[in-house]
Amino acid sequence: MFLSRRSTQAEYFDTLRPERETAQFYASLARLNRLFLFARPFQRTLPALLGGDSCKRLSLLDLGAGDGLLGKVLGQWAAKRNWKWETTNLDVNVRALSANSGTANVAGSVAALPFRDRSFDVVIASQMTHHLTDEQAEQHLREGWRVARQALVISDLHRNAALYAGLWLVLRLGRFPRNVGDDGLLSVRRGWHVDELDRIARKAGIAEAKVWLYFGARVLLGAARD
C-alpha cells in the first residue's frame, strides 16, 4: 500500500551533481525549509531538553548540514536571546559545504564521525536521516549519540498522505525545478513513522531517546544525558 513502507529508491541529489545544479538545488531547498519552518523543532526542543541556562552557550554538530543554513538560522535565533550557539557542519557533499562560509565545515560520513566521544554539546540532524537505510540510520544515531555531550536531536519527515499532498501542492504553486520536486516527494516516501525511528534508536543503544510526532509533518527524536 502507498506509504505503508519506507521507499528505498535513491533521490536524484543523493549523488554528487555539477556545481551549478547543486547551487540551484540548495537555493530551492532553502525556500522550502524556510517555508516549512525547519529550524523551529530545534528552537522548541533544545531549551525544553536542556533548560534555559544550559542553552546560553552551546557547540552544535549538524549532521548532513549541506550548505549550513540550519546552523546560521539557529545561531541568529540564539543571538537574539543573548545566547551563543556555534555550529560545525558535517556533510559528504563537499560542493554543498563549499557554499558555506563563516563556520566550521567537515567532510565526512554521518555513520563514521571523525570526532572523539562527547566532542559537542549537542548533535542535530534535520531531514537527512531518511536518506539512509534502517541499518545506516542505526549507525548514524549511534555515532551521533557517541559524540554528543548533552543531547541528540533528530528532526525528519513523517511519512503520511497529508504531507505528501500538501508538499505536492506547494511544489507546483511555487514552480520549483522538477528534480527538486521529485526528490521532495520521494523524501516523504522515505520518511518515518514514530515506531520505526523509536525502534532504530533502541537498537542503537539510546535508552534515553524519546520519539514523537511534531504537528503531523515531522517525527522528532530527542535524547538528553543525565
Image (cartoon, grey):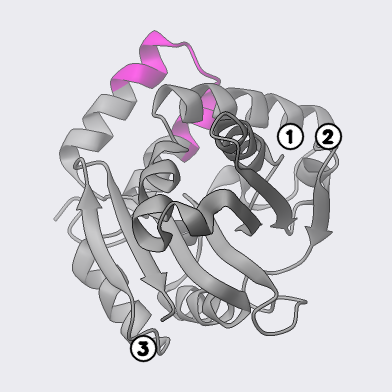
Secondary element at tag 1: helix
Q: Is residue 40 magenta?
A: no
In front: mark 1 or mark 3? 3
In this view, the residue in front, 172 or 96, is 96
Query: Mark 2 and mark 3: span between their CA atoms?
Result: 38 Å
| Residue 140, quarter of the rendered image | bottom right
Residue 106 located left or right of residue 224: right
**Residue at 43% across / 42% down in the picture?**
43
Residue 104 in the image: above or below residue 17 = below
Q: Quadrant of the N terminus?
A: bottom left
* Label 1 packing within 10 angstroms: few (<14), some (14-19), many (20+): some
Secondary element at tag 2: helix
| Residue 208, quarter of the rendered image | bottom left
Label 1 amino acid? Thr
Label 2 amino acid? Glu
**Residue at 69% across / 41% down in the picture?**
68
- In the picture of the structure, the residue carrying the numbered disc 2 is 19
- In the picture of the structure, the residue carrying the numbered disc 3 is 203
Q: Position of residue 16 (x, y in %)?
A: 75, 49
Q: Which residues are magenta?
A: 169-183
Q: Position of residue 193 (x, y in %)?
A: 23, 61
Residue 192 in the image: above or below residue 183 = below
Query: Mark 1 and mark 2: span between their CA atoms?
Result: 5 Å
Query: Cβ–Cβ below 8 Å for labels 1 and 2?
Result: yes
Q: Is residue 7 visible?
A: no
Q: Is residue 209 visible?
A: yes
Q: Position of residue 218 (x, y in %)?
A: 30, 47
Q: Is residue 179 magenta?
A: yes
Q: Quadrant of the C terminus?
A: bottom left
- In the picture of the structure, the residue carrying the numbered disc 1 is 22
